[in-house]
Image (cartoon, rainbow, N blue to C red):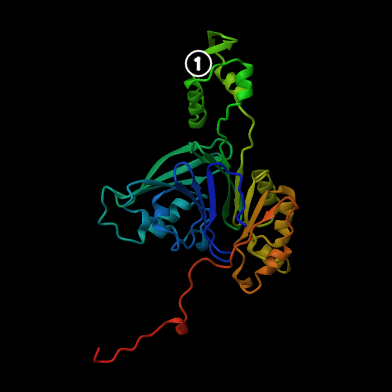
Amino acid sequence: MKPSFPFRNLVPTFFSGLLDDPILLLRIRPTGHHLMFDCGQVHHLAKRTFTHLDAIFISHAHMDHWMGIDSVVRQLIAADKTVDIYGPPGIADKFEHRLRGYDWNLAEDYWSSFRVHEIYPQRLDRTLFSGPDSFDRIPLDPSTREGEVVYGNKYLEVCADSCDHRVESVIYRINERPVYLIDDTKLDELKLKPGAWLGKLKSCFLHQRDFPAELKLTQIDGEDEREIVVSDVPGLVRKLSKPQTSHSIGYISDTGFTPENKEKILRLMQDVDLLICECTFLREAKDRARTSWHLCTDDVNELLAALQPAYFLPMHLSRSYSRRSEELYRELKPPERTCLLKLPLQLTPRPLLANEIKWQEYSEDE
């Protein structure tokens, strides 16, 4: 049975199996555009997925989370757009080294560019790699971070914090922005006549623009109507707003289970609806989890008990459990309110075995 996620405008799809390199793709329903979280092996994604890609969020630059960036560049090179890449400090240098491994003497004006954002606690350091200029590196002015937010549009915001994985590894939270819903009961109580002004308020709310300084409205009293001027427009918006719950997605890969990391995870992921989290080792291999700075099932169970997400998707299981994957689900003990989602072992196509290849013999007469 397919889970009924509560998101209004976000469609999350995990494009990996339990053992595969993780890729979370987030489609923004009203625009058809995508955000990608990590990009290990991406060869099984359709080309249209890349052409609608707006931003990529990298947890860290280990190969299984980063190697697909070459394929992203290849698929987008002629798309004539600018794609944003977010990641830990140093990701711009690593991206430049990947690009410098190729010759770009045939650059065209319609080639895409990539804008890299390195996530620091108080700022984002930004670098442009210009496609029309053979991906020359162009420093941009840094931008100031507002709290935990690193990216946003009118439908969502992405928050981030850095954890320790023996390298800096970024965990992400995606918050769906609430829409502006009018409470018709309150509209009637204020005796206000609906009109184009409601659409104007909704547009300001959705696009995060300033509300007008005042509004001229029609107030209805029985059969009589009179014009009024409202000068406290933000106050009117609050009065007319229908209460609603905002929904969110948490993405954790990879991190050690230290007190500092645990504190960051619990703070950033509080009240998430869908938690997607690595669970690399079973309980028996807790020592391996500690030395490699990954999570085991006991660690994940502790996080689940504290966070109580509506849905939980474990991922990134060690390949050493390729024949024991069901043990993972037996050891995970999510809270009663949490729906545990299961992945197939692998999604990427495997090579054909010799006995699966159909040979056709031809005679010389043919």
In front of the other: 241 or 207: 241
Label 1 sits on residue: 213
Does residue 339 show up?
A: yes
* Residue 102 image offset from top left, x and y in percent: 33, 61
In front of the other: 7 or 54: 7
Residue count near mark 1 (Cα–Cα under 10 Å), binned few <14, some 14–19, many ≥20? few
Q: Quadrant of residue 158?
A: top right
Q: Is residue 285 left or right of residue 218?
A: right
Which residue lies at the image location 75% right of the left edge and 52% below the top edge?
336
* Residue 157 image offset from top left, x and y in percent: 54, 40
Q: Is residue 297 left or right of residue 170?
A: right
Q: Quadrant of residue 149?
A: top right
Rendered position, 146 above or below 188: below
Q: How many marks?
A: 1
Rendered position, 244 above or below 338: above
Q: Secondary structure at mark 1?
A: loop
Q: Quadrant of the N terminus?
A: bottom right
Query: Farthest front residue?
Result: 223
Q: Amino acid at mark 1?
A: Ala
* Residue 10 image offset from top left, x and y in percent: 53, 45
Q: Quadrant of the C terminus?
A: bottom left
Does residue 85 show up?
A: no
In front of the other: 69 or 122: 69
Query: Farthest bottom residue?
Result: 364
Rendered position, 295 above or below 242: below
